Amino acid sequence: MKKIISIILAALIAASCIACLCGCGKNYDGEVNVYNWGEYVSNGEDGLLDVIDEFEKRTNIKVNYTTYETNEELYNMLKNSNVSYDVIIPSEYMISKLIKEDMLLELNYDNIPNYKYLMERFKKLSCDPESKYTVCYSWGITAMVYDKTKISQKPDSWEILWDKNLKGQILMFNNSRDAMAIALQLCGINPGNCTKEDVDTAAKKLREQKPLLKNYVMDKVFNEMEKSQAAIAPYYAGDVITMMNNNEDLDCAMIADGANLFYDAMCIPKCSKNKENAEKFINFMQDPEIAAANFEYLYYATPNQETYDKYLDDDVKNNELIFPSDEYLDKCYVFSNVSDDVYSYMQEQFVKIQAE
């Protein structure tokens, strides 16, 4: 489901490129060090906008761009190295941890006027209720992707992931937080925050599931589902859309009782040496045109209201998997920053389950 940016947007971007060419060159006016998830910004593939290149053209600020694979990798780099980063894009629970440990700088929102375009729901995040440290970058929910040739009726509960009739055809998250969350929710426990006792309950549920699984997966889910090698898998909504795009036999299933509402937000760590340039970069990423280009590439929901209103097709805006209703989102939960000992225990139990 690519190519959703309007002709108007394409024209605006083309015009801005022409206007900014005169500012390009090898002598930059400054730099900004961006540390982001892999493949998490529009990079010029498939004829889409190269967002980093566009920022450099418009501002003549050099972007030193590196990536990480997990929130924990990001945290360890900030905590245990001397590398200086100016913009990071952690997830909600990691933002809570970074704030608690006094590792973020407060933003000067005067330098981020595009903050005004954010949807109200994403201006005061649960991890940053006073809006001191964050500008939301993208968001989504967890759902399921299933093969209609193997499952005839659309499911609406995680319980199907324990269906004995699907033994050997079920995939499960290969990370402790998401897998445990599904089990916790089925056990009537709020996955947003949990104790060691709750982890034990979830672990018991996951042990019941293990004999039914084909495999625990993350990125391998794409190959499994797109090639019809499995019947069903829980995954992130934006990626479910991608899989459906590549296999017409696939469909999506949302959890009737709500699921995980996740989001990533742009922050400035205390190690930053280019705070003003960081704020320019954050502001640029919330330019409605740029947010639209990133949405087209990522297919995770944009928190930018102007982008949503002006640049997205009605088919996209009406897709409840990408943009669930407020009523549905009110039923969802957000991960909080559980204590280090509980999170370590969660990981330990998950590894044990996999090894048994």
Image (cartoon, rainbow, N blue to C red):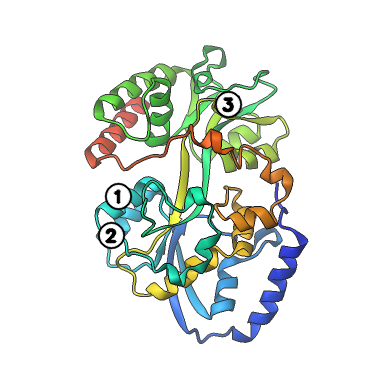
Kindly indicate whether the residue at mark 3 contacts the one at mark 1 (C-beta within 8 angstroms): no
Read off the residue under disc 3. 232
Q: Which mark is residue 97?
A: 1
Q: Distance between the residues labelled 2 and 1?
A: 9 Å
Residue 198 in sight in this render: yes
**Closer to the camera in the image, 18 or 218:** 18
Mark found first going from the N terminus, 1 or 3: 1
Give me the residue at 53% from left, 81% from top. Answer: 60
Q: What residue type is labelled 1?
A: Lys
Give me the residue at 32% from left, 58% from top. Answer: 77
Mark found first going from the N terminus, 2 or 3: 2
Read off the residue under disc 2. 103
**Closer to the camera in the image, 52 or 6:** 6
Q: How far apart are marks 1 and 3 (CA)?
A: 33 Å
Q: In this view, does 13 lie to the left or right of 337?
A: right
Please, what secondary structure does the residue beneath circle 2 have? loop
User: Which image quadrant is residue 209 in?
Assistant: top left
Coordinates of residue 243 in the picture (x, y in percent): 64, 39
Judge depth for marks 1 and 3 and give the one in front: 1
Coordinates of residue 7 in the picture (x, y in percent): 77, 62
Q: What residue type is labelled 2?
A: Met
Please, what secondary structure does the residue beneath circle 1 have? helix
Residue 43 in sight in this render: no
Tell me if residue 339 comes above or below residue 279 in the rendering. above
Q: Distance between the residues labelled 2 and 3?
A: 40 Å
**Closer to the camera in the image, 111 or 48:** 111
